[in-house]
């Protein structure tokens, strides 16, 4: 059953919290929700967690004014599955963000991925609409780049950011640079319109993302409850920072990126105070997975005392920094030893909005309000999945490993090391080791680094094994895995600026310019196929932007040769073979050719302010094998 507004529950919550924000109409409204999700930031990267340079004064103050969680976990040691878990409240094995291509294989959403977040999943912004929330995502989406996976099709009202990480630069032949979007419109690409200097580390992206957040808060704070999901990626290699922050950290370039993020968080919290909505805004700060030690030391953070990092199910791969802030509601200076999960942000946010989670599916996230507001501790397990495999489980202070693996010997010998300087014999294995009959069990309170497994013969081991085995058995008996979304890659779907979405921006530009009886303003559209320019005309009997226009053509190539139906008059692009394209005259272009679709406006009419060219581009791809090597 879809989540519904529970009015009586909301009023009870208001009484418990002893406060309510007042909207413009004077009616009580639920609190704003601001989720700050970092990328590859480690548990040990903040001063409040013991980072010795103490370069995060704003985040440290946020912790001092709110609550710190030392035992907070991601739902996966990799970015895409963890983000899917946050927004659905469900383990990746349930929401489909995993692969079955190999046992315990990590997988994410590269440009050539076919899958993405399924329509059957109900995302947090979709559900918050029922309580009147306006939602925006700023930064990295990472839940699929094809049109059906666009964040505005899954509940968000606004988006500024990218469907992927800022990998690159690419040559725009075999692989395009990653696109950046404002809502439906592709506004540029990393390393092109949004430059990142790999040599110096300079990029203004964090400042752009900060301004997007500040503008959204200013627009919404007095009118609607808002949900802002700020998912910046400056701490993901290649790390970057803007010029004022470069060279300012004792920790090198990674520290520069952290300092800029800390400054940005400080500005957001300051704005909430200035707008007098701080006491009606719940803010939570965490990361998608542990620090990527493979990029250390210059391009990665610290996982503190914990073992290994990103891509592993040891503590360093999944235990995250976590801070909660809500002045007047969360008492200052609190530390909660509640076992928390990134999936709890889904359920907690719904509770804040007076909503109940969907009842037609398993929800793994807990409502953390009892811990946040009353200091209560709730018993719950933490499941550590890697791909399709349950690798470990924590219950209380004990963690049982059923499988151990870092990465393959082949990769390790090539210099790929997920656990640099942390070899633990029999634990940080380079082959997938099965411990399901006799799990390795650690007491995380005494041994947070997972170096000294309990003796199989000890009473402590037997008691912990009995409790954990019971919980795991219940979990596995009830588990209904989702359809895996990360199995198949195909170069024909490469570039999230896919045809139907890439053309939308230029097409709307033409539509605005050509609207109304303004003959002095001319709008012309054209395709550039390789080096040749092919003019296009509006659909027969129509205007730019009307039904049956460019958008109706869909993606003009696929892994199977098909003739694209065209609404255009004049030469059109059609597929000659998988991964190639040509015109009606039969000119074919090889896979990897860049195609630009542009609208050019000229003239001196009332819409002359729209003069100039507005373009989108994409690559002609070539199908790859049936499985994704992610």
Image: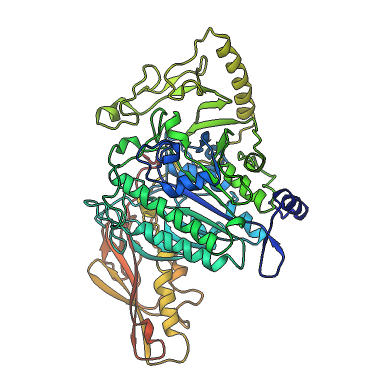
Measuring 57% from the left and 13% from the top, which residue is drawn there? 460
Q: Give residue 126's position: percent from left, percent from top.
A: 60, 56
Q: Give residue 452's position: percent from left, percent from top.
A: 44, 16
Q: Is residue 530 left or right of residue 447?
A: left
Residue placed furthest toward the right = 8
- Position of residue 434 relative to residue 62, above or below, is above
Task: Decide which of 509, 551 is in the foreground and name it.
Answer: 509
Task: Decide which of 627, 89 is in the foreground and name it.
Answer: 89
Q: Can residue 28 be seen in the rendering of this structure?
A: yes
Asked where in the image residue 180 lies, by quadrant, the reply is bottom left
Residue placed furthest toward the top = 457
Measuring 37% from the left and 92% from the top, which residue is drawn there? 520
The colour scheme used to paint the residues is: rainbow
Q: Is residue 74 left or right of residue 243?
A: right
- Position of residue 518 relative to residue 351, above or below, is below
Measuring 35% from the left and 40% from the top, which residue is drawn there? 53
Q: Give residue 36's position: percent from left, percent from top.
A: 49, 50
Asked where in the image residue 48 lies, by quadrant, the reply is top left
Q: Can residue 102 be seen in the rendering of this structure?
A: no
Q: Give residue 420's position: percent from left, percent from top.
A: 31, 29
> Quadrant where the C terminus lies?
top left
The number of callouts visible is: 0
Asked where in the image residue 243 lies, by quadrant, the reply is bottom left
Task: Decide which of 603, 546 is in the foreground and name it.
Answer: 603
């Amino acid at each position: 059953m879809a989540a519904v507004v529970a009015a009586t529950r909301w009023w009870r919550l208001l009484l418990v919290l002893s406060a309510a924000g007042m909207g413009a109409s004077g009616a009580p409204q639920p609190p704003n929700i601001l989720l700050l999700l970092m990328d590859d930031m480690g548990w040990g990267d903040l001063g409040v967690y013991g980072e010795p340079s103490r370069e995060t004064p704003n985040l440290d103050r946020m912790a001092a004014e709110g609550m710190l969680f030392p035992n907070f976990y991601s739902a996966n040691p990799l970015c895409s599955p963890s983000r899917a878990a946050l927004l659905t409240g469900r383990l990746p094995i349930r929401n489909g963000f995993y692969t079955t291509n190999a046992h315990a294989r990590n997988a994410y959403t590269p440009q050539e991925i076919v899958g993405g977040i399924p329509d059957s999943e109900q995302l947090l912004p979709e559900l918050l609409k029922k309580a009147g929330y306006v939602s925006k995502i700023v930064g990295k989406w990472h839940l699929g780049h094809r049109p059906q996976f666009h964040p505005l099709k899954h509940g968000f009202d606004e988006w500024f950011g990218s469907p992927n990480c800022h990998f690159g630069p690419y040559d725009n032949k075999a692989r395009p640079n990653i696109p950046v979007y404002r809502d439906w419109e592709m506004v540029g690409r990393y390393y092109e319109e949004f430059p990142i200097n790999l040599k110096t580390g300079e990029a203004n992206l964090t400042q752009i993302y900060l301004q997007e957040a500040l503008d959204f808060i200013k627009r919404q704070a007095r009118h609607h409850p808002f949900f802002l999901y700020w998912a910046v990626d400056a701490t993901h290699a290649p790390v970057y920072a803007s010029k004022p922050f470069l060279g300012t950290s004792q920790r090198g370039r990674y520290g520069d990126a952290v300092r800029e993020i800390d400054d940005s968080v400080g500005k957001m919290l300051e704005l909430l105070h200035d707008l007098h909505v701080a006491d009606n805004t719940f803010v939570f700060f965490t990361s998608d997975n542990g620090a990527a030690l493979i990029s250390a030391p210059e391009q990665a953070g610290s996982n503190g005392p914990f073992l290994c990092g990103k891509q592993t199910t040891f503590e360093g791969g999944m235990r995250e920094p976590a801070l909660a802030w809500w002045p007047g509601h969360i008492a200052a200076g609190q530390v909660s030893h509640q076992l928390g999960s990134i999936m709890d942000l889904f359920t907690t946010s719904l509770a804040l909005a007076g909503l109940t989670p969907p009842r037609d599916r398993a929800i793994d996230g807990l409502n953390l309000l009892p811990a946040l507001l009353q200091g209560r501790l709730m018993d719950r397990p933490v499941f550590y999945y890697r791909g399709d495999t349950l690798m470990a489980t924590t219950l209380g202070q004990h963690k049982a490993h059923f499988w151990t693996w870092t990465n393959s010997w082949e990769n390790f010998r090539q210099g790929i090391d997920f656990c640099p300087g942390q070899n633990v014999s029999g634990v940080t294995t380079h082959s997938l080791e099965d411990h399901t009959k006799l799990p390795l069990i650690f007491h995380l309170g005494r041994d947070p680094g997972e170096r000294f497994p309990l003796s199989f013969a000890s009473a402590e081991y037997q008691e912990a094994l009995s409790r954990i085995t019971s919980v795991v058995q219940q979990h596995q008996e009830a588990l209904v895995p989702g359809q895996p979304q990360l199995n198949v890659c195909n170069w024909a779907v490469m570039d999230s600026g896919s045809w139907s979405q890439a053309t939308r921006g230029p097409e709307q530009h033409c539509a605005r310019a050509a609207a109304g009886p303004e003959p002095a303003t001319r709008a012309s559209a054209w395709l550039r196929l390789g080096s040749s320019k092919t003019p296009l005309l509006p659909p027969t009997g129509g205007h730019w932007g009307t039904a049956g226009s460019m958008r109706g053509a869909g993606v003009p190539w696929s892994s199977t040769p098909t003739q694209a139906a065209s609404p255009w008059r004049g030469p059109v692009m059609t597929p000659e073979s998988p991964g190639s394209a040509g015109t009606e005259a039969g000119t074919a272009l090889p896979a990897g050719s860049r195609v630009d679709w542009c609208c050019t406006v000229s003239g001196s009419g009332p819409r002359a302010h729209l003069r100039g060219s507005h373009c989108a581009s994409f690559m002609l791809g070539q199908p790859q094998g049936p499985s994704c090597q992610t």
